[in-house]
Image (cartoon, grey):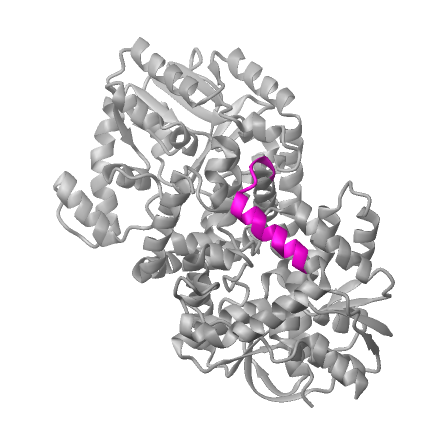
Amino acid sequence: MNAQAHEFKASVRRYTADLGHRDWIQKALAGYYVKRDEFKNRFQSWPSARNAAAEIKWEAINHLDRYLDEFVSKLEARGTKVFWAPDAQAARDYIVGVARAHKVRSIIKSKSMTGEEVHLADALEQSGFEVVESDLGEYIVRLRREPPYHIVFPAMHLTRKQISDLFHSRLGSEPTNNPEDLTMFARRVMRRKYCEADMGISGANFAIAETGMISITENEGNARLTTSLPKIHVAIVGIEKVLPKLSDLALFLPMLATAGAGQPITGYNTLYGGPRQSGEPDGPEEFHVVLLDNRRTALLADAEQRDALHCIRCGACLNVCPIFKNVGGHSYGTTYQGPIGSVITPHLRGLQDWKHLSQASSLCGACTETCPVKINLHHHLLHNRRNAVRARPPRSEKMIQAGFVFMMRHLAIYRLAARIGRTAQPLQPVLRATIFDPVRAWTKTRSFPRLAKKSFRELWRERKTS
Amino acid sequence: MKVALFIPCFVDQFYPHVGMSIVGVLERLGHTVDYPEAQTCCGQPAFNSGFWDEARSVAERQMRVFRDSEMVVIASGSCGAMVKVFYPELFRGHPQEVEAKALATKTFEFSDFLVNRLGVLDVGARFPGRATFHDGCHALRELGLKKEPRQLLRHVQGLELVEMKEAETCCGFGGTFAVKFPMISTAMGEVKCASIADTGADYVISNDCSCLMQIRGVLDRQGKSVKTLHLAEVLAQT
């Protein structure tokens, strides 16, 4: 087992044993289900909306070259500097370079999973820049020095008390159980930072090819301040974020809000098309868009799983995933948690290192059923498993499977195995859950059924002859 | 109608009475049941583990067994999904692709067969008790069977059907997943069993023995007395 799989299993053991945590996550999502369903019903037809969204993303992803060109040329026409980053290192280097060139002192950042993916905040801090997260959830997890727990709700694992304690110990606030007070306290800290910052970093929810604009969706207004107060705005954008037309947002904005947070529409939706133009009273002097590949083109080349690039990072698949709810977001050890993370991480960071995430699934399909852009998530987990075996068959499992095939292809062996099982069965209670128990992985926590005295075949024969 | 029975390997060995119940229900409805005795397994354990060559080798044999059957009824939503959904994918681009699709087309999960192929909702069963139905994920999401088992159960005399809060949430079985990641699988089973317990039902019914094996396994360790039954076992009671 590799280090990642080992760590995953260790974390899973910890989290599944933490009943309080499991309970908290269940409770945290209960309200979401109600609201999500309420606002799904506001669509004339949610299934049709999903079909339309899947078709639009299919078109965008399958003609990515054309749409990206259009997006970039429109952006550049208004004076935006666009950088094509082939990988995380290139993206970090470029952004650090911009900060250095402008002798930036303080950086404010709004929520960006793409930023997390390239470890942007860490890279900037290591280069000597102060970075402040302006999204409340991100601010909290950054204070705790831990990665986001969930792609949309980064601090969902924390109780109000934990946040109050954190603010108290780290920032000297008065302990409180009132969420408004906690928010107000963070806001006071942040407002000062917005004014000090000379660089604002954001992500993007959508990149509109037709108009050359990025669209940012948020609930706190922090992204607007992050992108408009500092004199430089840098947006880091995955190349898959493209939508062909501006009017596509009419579908995608309410869809993202509904699937992602159980809202009819998110609080703030803003389009950014370039730096301050002559005659405009505000906006940044410079606008940089960093377009990130980081192995997305490898996924694009995989026709079978290409639809994984449809993802709008709404997090709906995490919210319904029984694995996610029981193991928690931090167990994954990835930027993108839950089903979508298990599907794409092997493509982005190496199949053999991350295949265990595709194996850690009961393939229940709740993710695929909920995905607003209809990514065939749970079947892609099967594809990842197949690809991993094909590339490097694990020796011991290969032998077990060979035995399985031999047994199932030879009726006599199948029957013999059943007879041996029946004969050896009385030993089972004695050996239960010891190393001699062949099914101990099962019997440690669950009772194992007894082989029937007579198989169906035997019962059938008796019935036929009687 | 002449029906060939597909009894998955673990039903054959652990839950043969479920197969016999299906025989009972189908014969009561006036159909002729045949059991091709050479059958073994659908190949799902290999398929789900990523060993598609191995799965093909098992599936190919199973396809031969049912080649001449007119109609196949399968006693598991999960193995049903394997045949109906995954055989065509498994054999895509292979010489047996046509045969895989042919078997997929003529195979029906038990409740699907009764409701959608035969148009029967009332099989004349009688079963007093309070029960809740657990949706096996494969039957529910791969085969789209949600209302069928419930329609059948609502027509059972004396049976009170109550919905649990998380009927559609996975029980955590997931085949080899259950032993590769026993801690996750068990946690999921516990969530499921809490949801079952909340209904106060005496029975939990499903159309998948594999889910019932998981649910039974967890219930036993919790010392709960809720009984687990396959849909066919209920429908066979008169």
Image quadrant occupied by the N terminus of chain B: bottom right
Instruction: Mark yes or no: residue B47 visible.
Output: yes
B189 shown above or below A60:
below
Instruction: Mark yes or no: residue A257 visible.
Output: no
Left or right: B25, with B131 as reference point: right
Residue at screen point 61% across, 33% down: A247
Q: Quadrant of residue A91?
A: top left
Residue at screen point 35% across, 31% down: A110
Most foreground residue, B76 or A290 = B76
A61 shown above or below B106:
above
Image quadrant occupied by the C terminus of chain B: bottom right
Q: Which residues are magenta?
A: A390-407
Q: Quadrant of residue A26?
A: bottom left
For residue A333: magenta? no
Left or right: A3, with B150 as reference point: left
Q: Position of residue A273 (x, y in %)?
A: 49, 21
Left or right: B164, with A230 as reference point: right
For residue A402: magenta? yes
A355 shown above or below A97:
below
Most foreground residue, A326 or B199 = A326
Residue at screen point 31% across, 23% down: A123
Q: Position of residue A433 (x, y in %)?
A: 40, 66
Residue at screen point 81% across, 48% down: B96
Q: Position of residue A430 (x, y in %)?
A: 41, 74
